[in-house]
Amino acid sequence: MLRVLIRRETPNDRDAVHAVHNAAFATEDGSVAFEATLVDALRAAGDVIPALSLVAERDGAVVGHVLGSRAQLAGATSVGLAPLGVFPDMQGTGIGSALMHAVLAAADPLDFPEAVLLGDTGYYRRFGFRPAEPLGIKASDPSWADHFQVRTLQAWSG
């Protein structure tokens, strides 16, 4: 059994978090992965929710990361989850699942009604995510509709 520690990200983790996402979402041309720059942009915008920026640590090294940030849905604040990344050689070991379960558990008591993300419907279904459109939640970009998903939290009033 693989043992990892899931904890809040600290300022000392920033380079490691960048490296995780750059490796997890490596580009063919070797340029910096969009997901790595997305984390930096969300930090710079002040949208990161510190309690929802979690790392997975193994043997003292950061091997995975998930980010929760403020998102707007119909004028109300929601949690946007992205990115979720794990070093390629650690993928398939349950680290991504552990991070997702942890971030959802941490988001629930913060009184957000839902968490939203853009991602693979087959993967995120296991965490209770489902297509957002049937709940009346539309993606800001219509081309995202098939992958824009929502998971309701305790504060959901539907």
Image (cartoon, helix red, strand yellow):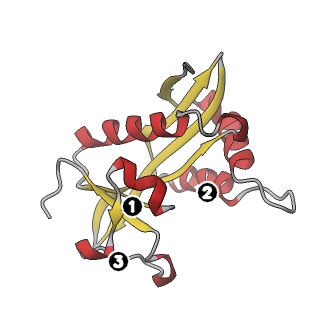
Mark 1 or mark 3, whichever is nearer to me: 3
Point out the tag, 1 or 3, that comes first from the N-terminus. 1
In the rendered picture of this protein, how many numbered marks are placed on residues?
3
Looking at the image, do the residues carrying marks 1 and 3 touch, with CB atoms under 8 Å apart?
no
Q: Quadrant of residue 15?
A: top right
Q: Where is residue 131 in the image (x, y as percent from the top left)?
A: 35, 68
At mark 3, the secondary structure is: loop
> In which quadrant of the rendered view does residue 134 lie?
bottom left
Label 1 vs 2, first from the N-terminus: 2
How far apart are labels 3 and 2 at the CA level? Answer: 21 Å
Callout 2 secondary element: helix
Mark 1 = which residue? 71
Mark 1 surroundings within 10 Å by alpha-carbon count, few (fewer than 14), some (14 through 19), many (20 or more): some
Q: Where is residue 114 in the image (x, y as percent from the top left)?
A: 28, 56
The residue under the point 17% across, 50% down is 155
Q: Which residue lies furthest to the bottom in this view?
A: 142
**Of callouts 3 and 2, which one flags the residue occurring earlier in the amino acid sequence?**
2
**Can you give x and y, in whole percent of width and height, for residue 146 in the image?**
45, 75
| Label 2 crowd (10 A; few <14 / some 14-19 / many >=20) | some
Question: Which residue is labeled 3 in the image?
Answer: 138
- Of tags 3 and 2, the one toward the viewer is 3
Label drawn at residue 38: 2
User: Which residue is nearer to you in this view: 133 or 141?
Assistant: 133
Q: Which mark is residue 51?
A: none
